Amino acid sequence: MKNFILIVLLFTLGCQESSHSQSNNIPGIGDSGDKAAQTPGEQGEAPLTSDELFSMVNERVIQASCIRCHNSERPRAGIDLSTRELVDELIVAGDLEKSLLHEVIATGFMPPRGTPVSDENLLLLEEYILSLTAN
């Protein structure tokens, strides 16, 4: 338990330090300086659009962790994530708690096997969900 608390504390401190020393709010994103890797509000740059955020979520979350089981040919549990429209059916725009896709990933329920979605990519999914109210 002490190790867990220490890890959480170090992660929190590391995020606070990186937010002061770097301009992005998602660790590891924006290092290259190109717009596709930037986060909203980065040094006066225009925030990423929901389309740009979805493209990143699709690549880093859906394609990497979900599509193997939740595709059009074999939609496990009746869930098909092969198109943006189908992904958006599991999201309530602007509401993380009511968005089923966010809840199953954030709680670790999905993916059931393999590597869990990283904190960085979970934050990216959150940015996407929250961006849907602005567009």
Image (spheres, rainbow, N blue to C red):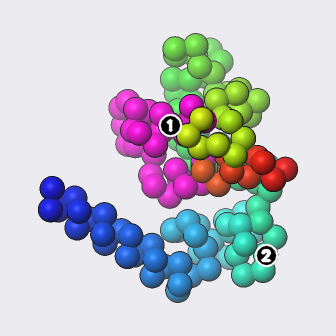
Q: Does 106 appear in magenta?
A: yes
Q: Is mark 1 on a helix, strand or loop?
A: helix
Q: Which residue is drawn at 52% across and 27% down?
A: 68
Coordinates of residue 10 in the picture (x, y in percent): 31, 72
The image shows residue 99, relative to residue 17, as above or below, that is: above
Q: What element carries label 2?
A: loop
Q: Which mark is residue 103?
A: 1
The image shows residue 22, relative to residue 59, as above or below, that is: below
* Pointer 2 local density, CA inside 10 Å: few below 14, some 14–19, many at least 20: few
Amino acid at the residue labelled 2:
Glu
Q: In terms of depth relative to the viewer, which is nearer, 31 or 78?
A: 78
Task: Report the magenta residues as a range.
Answer: 99-125
Q: Residue at x 36, y 32 (%)?
A: 113
Circles 1 and 2: CB atoms closer than 8 Å: no
Q: Which mark is residue 121?
A: none
Work out whether mark 1 precedes mark 2 in sequence or the reverse, and give the earlier one. Answer: 2
Q: Name the residue under label 2.
A: 45
Q: Does 111 appear in magenta?
A: yes
Residue found at the far right of this picture: 135
Coordinates of residue 18 in the picture (x, y in percent): 48, 79
Coordinates of residue 89 in the picture (x, y in percent): 70, 27
Q: Can residue 34 be seen in this view?
A: no
Coordinates of residue 52 in the picture (x, y in percent): 76, 54
The image shows residue 55, relative to residue 112, as above or below, that is: below
Q: Is residue 122 visible?
A: yes
Q: Residue at x 68, y 36 (%)?
A: 92
Q: Nearer the viewer, mark 1 or mark 2?
A: 1
**Residue 33, quarter of the rendered image:** bottom right
Q: Residue at x 61, y 73 (%)?
A: 24
